[in-house]
Image (tube, rainbow, N blue to C red):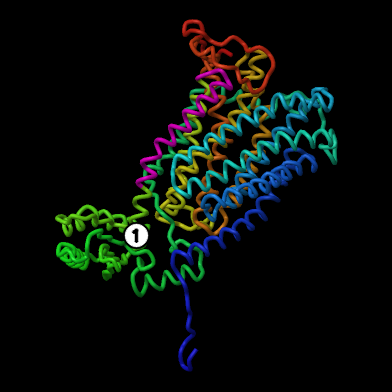
Amino acid sequence: RRQGQGDIRVLTVGDLSASYYASEIAQQDLEQAELFGLPIALVILVIVFGALVAAAVPLVVALVAIAVAVGITAVVGQMMQLTSLILNVITMIGLAVGIDYSLFIIERFREERARGFDRLAAIERTGATATKAVVFSGTTVIIALTGMFLMPVTIFRSVGTGAVVVVTVSIAVSVTLVPALLGLLGDRINWPRRRSYDQPATTSPTGRPGFWSRASHLVMARPIVSMILAGGLLVAMSIPFLDLRTGMVGVENYPPGMIRDAYQIIARDFYAGIVSPIEVVIDAPASDPRVREGVDRLTAELAQQPVFGPVQTVTNDAGDLTLLTSPLAVDATSPESANAVHLLRGDLVPAAFGDLAGNVYVSGAPAFNEDFNQFVSDRTPIVFAFVLSLSFVLLTLAFRSIIVPFKAIIMNLLSVGASYGILVLIFQKGYGAGLFGFTQTHIITNWLPIFLFCILFGLSMDYHVFLLSRIREHYDQSGDNRESVAVGLESTGRIITGAALIMVAVFFAFSMGNLVEMQQLGFGLAIAIFLDATIVRSILVPATMALLGKWNWYLPRWLRWLPDLRIEGEAAPASAPESVAATITPVGDR
């Protein structure tokens, strides 16, 4: 500092500085999310189980799964590049599924004890039902996540690897450690108070039908109206998705600090694109007169375009490559930046180098962003088709029905679409962003829609598997469709709601960080799980089950050779429809 002058600040900005800063922020966000998410999850577990020990076991399982998954991923990281967000993704997904899977197993064990089975018999029956459902639903999640490996890009393969590893480990820990702990603890799982085991699943402690049983009968009394209202609401929420714009999150969206301060100073006094300029590479001898003429023409043309800054030209030592760089007046992720790339590739470069024998490439961060967006758009249908088709096959094998998988896929797509729409409203358009403390951007992170689809489709299918397996279990024993729906909802309603609340709390905790990518990811997951556990499970599932009756379990005769992978239930299945004429049932029938 010199006398009479202000302080001198030295700031750094650039790809390396931004990457290092992002890693630091990711670590801070992870610690903050754990401090918020773990206590909330414990409180919800205590409320769900009414016992401290039962509440603590799922947390222990989740933490063990996360620790093992991090170790495995560290080994994988020696062989492939991983994103700085990998620990956040592993912890977020690990807490969600690790708690969920062990929660369902513990609750089924307590239910079997309530039916009078001794400790070992209850564990055995739990293994044949809930544990089997955990393995199946977890496999569905893994299949959905493997869709990301169809995108040969580091970010997708990195987060996909972390998510697949932690889900796989969570399944393994849940089906091994949890039964072992149940064998050791027995009824001490209910400490500090003994649970009352004297009420059947479909009644409340007063002897009257429970909340979920009453709610399901209310919905099934007006199934068409319920389905139209619930489905219409989800479709309406999905409409903003039509305005989706994706791109790379730039330093302009970083939290306050040295990196963003440096960027803002550069954007104010120079050009925003100095940090990430657009580049034109001419692969031809620099001594060629056509190269020199083309460079002059392009430089003159760029000077006439206000979006382009001063052009710098460099030739390599061999004299066979020429590089032109120009900082844009806008940031590299803006719509104006994309327009500049299209202008160069479509008009300016062909006009300047049309007669050149060599190749001319438009590169740099703005061009990479546009190319990446196009690549994701081209590959998205392939990923969707892969995930949807494999999920359909798996559910068909599990429930021996082609109707149940079709409905599950449609309902999951509705909840995912609604999540997309809300993300666009909040992050892209700014409605409510300030309320949650989120950073408004004009884009959604370009890898996010695919990742959200894969993980949400898997997680949403979790709840469908647990709910429908209980419905099918009762239906196999009774053949009463409506009563089976009521029993299924009542027996799983409290536990699935608790599991969903835990997921929402964990995901929302991660959305409260400073990285825009994690804000969008955490909030998108939280919203979708909330919608799936409320509108989809509470309204759409019972409404469609009531409308279709025995058609829910329809399997064409030519598919009867498929193996029976029944998840829960030991009784022989009630007769399924074999022909249209034999199975047309009025909506009011059971």
Residue 293 is drawn in which quadrant? bottom left
Quadrant housing the C terminus: top right
Does 322 appear above or below 184? below
Where residue 80 sits in the image (x, y, percent)?
A: 52, 50
Report the side of 136 relative to 585 (left or right): right
Q: Is residue 210 magenta?
A: no
Which residue is painted at 84% across and 36% down in the image?
184
Residue placed under numbered mark 1 in the picture: 364
Q: Would you say 472 lies left or right of 180 here?
A: left
The outermost residue toward the bottom is 3
Stretch of the chain drawn in magenta: 374-402
Kindly give the residue lying farthest to the top in the view shown.
Answer: 582
Residue 565: % across, % down:
61, 20
Q: Which residue is rendered at x = 28% and y = 70% of the image? A: 312
Q: Which image quadrant for residue 325?
A: bottom left
Q: Amino acid at mark 1?
A: Gly
